Amino acid sequence: MFLKAENVTITFGGVNANQNVNVSFEKGQIVGLIGPNGAGKSTFFKAVIGFNRVASGHIYFKDEEITNQEPYKICRKGISTTFQKAQAFPDMTLEESVRVGAYCRIKNKKEAMAKAQEMINFVGLTGKEKAKISKLNMYDRKKAELAAALATQPELLLLDELFAGLVPSEVELILKYVKKVSEELGITLLIVEHVLRVVMSLCDQVFVLENGQIIASGSPEEVANNPEVIRAYLGGDSNVAAG
Amino acid sequence: MRSVKWTKRNSIYLAVLLALAAFLIYLPIGGSRRNINIGILVFIYIALGQSWNLLSGMSGLFSIAHALFYGIGAYGMSLMLARAGSNPLVGLLVGIGANLLVALIVGMVGSKLSGLYFTMALIGIHSIFYTLAGQLTITGGWLGISLPREWQLTRKELYIIALAIAVFMTVLFQVIRSSRIGTMFVALKENPQLAASLGSDIRKWRILAVLISATMASVVGSFYAIYMMAHNAEVFNGTVSLRIMMVCMVGGVGHIFGPWVGSALIIMDEYIRGAMPTEFASLSVVIYALVLIVMALLRPQGIMGSKIFQPKEVDVRAIENLDAREKTE
């Protein structure tokens, strides 16, 4: 397995935010993690990248245990992420900000600059290299964060609600870049997303979390027609795929 | 060939640089002994300001007791010359060595703790050194320690060395800022969580920031010992730390020329004191404090933080028509 989470339990103040979560998938897939608000999606995400402490259970990446390792070590092993709330180095220029990611694997400044430029071009921000991140709009900030994550040269990219806060036309555009990441760079994607239309159209495999536990998994079609998922997600018998 | 556009800001920089160069050359030739001394003090605080700027302005680790590193550098030099009968190079290296050791402890504490706790840990370690320097026999207690006269330099020699140190520290600051190290320092200051998620070992970079900053302050402290030829534990005094911070805050935190502007203004209180009647001399501190309060209220970003001294920002809106085109396609 490319990523394997085995009985992962995460506890905050005695409350289980994740309980015995099992998630596994192969390289090259686009995997979705969905669930209602407060289901524990981001909690699980942050445990994979080392920001949340796993109370019990194990996480393996390419058969190597990464449970509770420091975030920078996990990144160097090939897992990168974008956050739910777009993160940035506000006083840095776009180029320097992306270069921070490039320095994960490249020590030479010129080579790091070249890698940063490549990723800036890849996400369509050419021409804005010298703009400060704080001056960019939300759509560009999301792309800047994506470029920085890609500059670390990951094998697995975790996207935590990348589409949140964007207008529908921007969602379509950024979706194009996400597909490009998978198709052109061959990076495996794990996506937490509220925009179900995106998850259903993009993912090969979907996991559904409710109250910190996995209640269903399978292809988007299987999950969309799972009565438990419909109940958990919509509280009724509506069709999830229509979301 | 790429043409360089001459801007209004470039003209201001050039005018200031020329005036500064003329003044700096005039001072040791035509200046009085008092003016040369004030010049040396300005350079000392510029160099210390660059050291603080690197740690707090660039890396975001707020050093409230920076005199710790400065004092250790001073004692490294004075103890080696006065007690071990060694030479200044050994004194300098011993000061740096001792500082690296202390900086490693501070850095390790700082990398585990953050914000207020790092500051508290620094104050704690600083208090230990301040007290020991004032109590131990080897340091001469509160009476202090005198250096052998054979190492005494002329005012002009001291002036040139101080200027060289100030310029060197400024260049070093800029070299670090534009390198990979500088980018990582700024990254850990601005968003440590994001930096860590992008593969940056925050702990390592924090320790490195303290090590470099302490080494810079140590060199200045060692120079100060030779300049004064005698000093006591007051090199660790909180006023020194306060002045270092103020030099950067008035000049502009994180700006390469911030300590130059800040130091020149802050040290003006030496002139104010000299111009005032003796019984009111202590009131200069009041004026100094008032200036700082006004600065904090009106220009918290410091003088060099003013818009005119900032690099021209890219007009993002002008580029956004590209996006508009992209969206319509």
Image (cartoon, coloured by chain):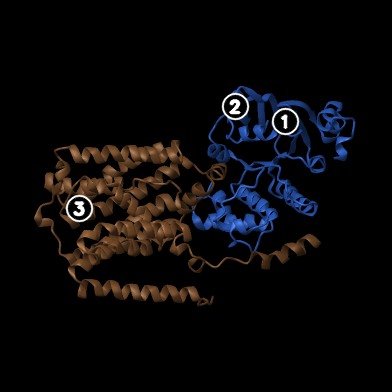
Nearer the observer, B86 or B121: B121
In x, y percent, where is residue B243?
33, 54
Describe the element under mark 3 as helix, strand or loop: helix
x, y percent for residue B35: 23, 68
Tag 1 subunit: A
| Chain ID for brown | B
Q: Give residue A222's quadrant in the image.
A: top right
Query: Which color is chain A depicted in?
Result: blue
Residue B84 in view, yes or no? no
Discs 3 and 1 share one subunit: no
Chain of the residue that carries numbered disc 2 in the rendered image = A
Mark 2 neighbour class, 10 Å CA radius: few under 14, some 14 to 19, many 20 or more: many
Asked which secondary structure carries label 2, the reply is loop
User: What residue does disc 3 label?
Assistant: B225
Q: CA distance from mark 3 to mark 2?
A: 53 Å
What's the residue type where badge 2 is placed?
A: Val
Disc 2 designates what residue?
A54
Describe residue B180's horizontal placement relative to residue A194 as left or right: left
Helix, strand or loop status at disc 1: loop
Residue type at mark 3 is Ala
Q: Quadrant of the C terminus of chain A?
A: top right
Determine if residue A233 is in view.
yes
Residue A39: mark in rendering: 1
